[in-house]
Image (cartoon, grey):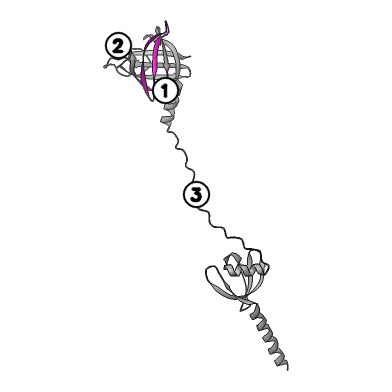
């Protein structure tokens, strides 16, 4: 009698297990027979045929299994975040080289109106002069009577300054020189228009070498 009762109870348990067990399918097509135990947040816990329990993300289940979990009271699984596409680092602007920035700073300091004098070899004043320097042009005049003398273009390279006359008495002539800019004081020493005159190596008038010095203050 006890044997029959044990067999009957076992049969009931097996039937019950077979009722609750189902085939689970993953999004990659893998299948497994297991019984739903519970839903924990974004995971589902199942009991395998051998009695072991296992937990795995709901988002890994097929659409049909996810719908089944929702029917059992489980919340909608969170969508698995996709890895963010790599973004290129921001392109940094290319820094100016020290030579370039120094040249721009020097040119910026030269812009404006300058008045001063031509210096003799002993440093004494020889004659007055006014220069108006823009981005690409230098205009020279005599402050006495505001008489225009001429104009030309110029180019900077380090502490060298080369001017080429384009108007007035300087037209067609080239002047190779050096300069020193100290705040509002500009000293410009240049070779004259004689082709045999060479660029000065110091800020000093030298009639023998064909070099003249201008000492100017910014207005």
Callout 3: SS: loop
Residue beneath disc 3: 87
Give how far apart the Cα atoms at labels 1 and 3 are: 41 Å
Query: Camera-side residue: 19 or 179?
Result: 19
Callout 1: SS: loop
Q: Measuring 69% from the left and 85% from the top, which residue is drawn there?
A: 12
Q: Residue 110 in the image: x percent, y percent?
A: 44, 20
Q: Comparing marks 2 and 3, which lies closer to the viewer? A: 3
Taking the view exactly as shown, the residue that stands out farthest to the top is 145
Quadrant where the N terminus lies? bottom right
Query: Camera-side residue: 52 or 164?
Result: 164
Q: Which residues are magenta?
A: 133-162
Q: Is residue 62 left or right of residue 7?
A: left
Taking the view exactly as shown, the residue that stands out farthest to the left is 196
Q: Measuring 43% from the left and 17% from the top, which residue is drawn there?
A: 186
Query: Camera-side residue: 36 or 177?
Result: 36
Disc 1 + disc 3, Cβ < 8 Å? no
Disc 2 + disc 3, Cβ < 8 Å? no
| Mark sitting earlier along the chain (1/3) | 3
Taking the view exactly as shown, the residue that stands out farthest to the bottom is 1
Q: Is residue 165 above or below residue 98?
A: above
Q: Which mark is residue 135?
A: 1
Q: Is residue 145 left or right of residue 31?
A: left
| Mark sitting earlier along the chain (2/3) | 3
Q: Is residue 38 magenta?
A: no
Residue beneath disc 2: 208
Label 2: how many residues lie within 10 Å, few (<14), some (14-19) or many (20+)? few
């Amino acid at each position: 009698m006890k044997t029959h009762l044990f067999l009957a109870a076992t049969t009931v348990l097996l039937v019950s297990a077979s009722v609750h067990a189902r085939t689970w399918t993953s999004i990659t097509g893998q299948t497994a027979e297991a019984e739903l135990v519970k839903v924990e947040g974004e995971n589902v816990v199942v009991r395998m045929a051998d009695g072991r329990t296992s937990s795995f993300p709901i988002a890994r289940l097929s659409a049909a299994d996810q719908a089944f979990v929702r029917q059992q009271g489980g919340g909608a699984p969170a969508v698995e975040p996709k890895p963010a596409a790599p973004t290129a680092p921001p392109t940094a602007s290319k820094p100016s080289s020290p030579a370039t920035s120094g040249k721009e700073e020097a040119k910026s300091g030269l812009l404006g109106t300058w008045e001063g004098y031509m210096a003799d070899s002993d440093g004494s004043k020889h004659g007055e002069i006014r220069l108006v320097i823009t981005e690409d042009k230098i205009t020279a005049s005599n402050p006495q009577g505001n008489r225009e003398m001429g104009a030309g273009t110029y180019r900077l390279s380090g502490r060298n300054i080369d001017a080429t006359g384009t108007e007035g008495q300087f037209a067609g002539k080239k002047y190779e020189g050096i300069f020193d800019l100290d705040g509002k004081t500009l000293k410009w020493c240049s070779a004259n228009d004689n082709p045999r005159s060479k660029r000065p190596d110091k800020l000093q008038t030298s009639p023998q070498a064909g070099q003249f010095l201008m000492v100017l203050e910014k207005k």
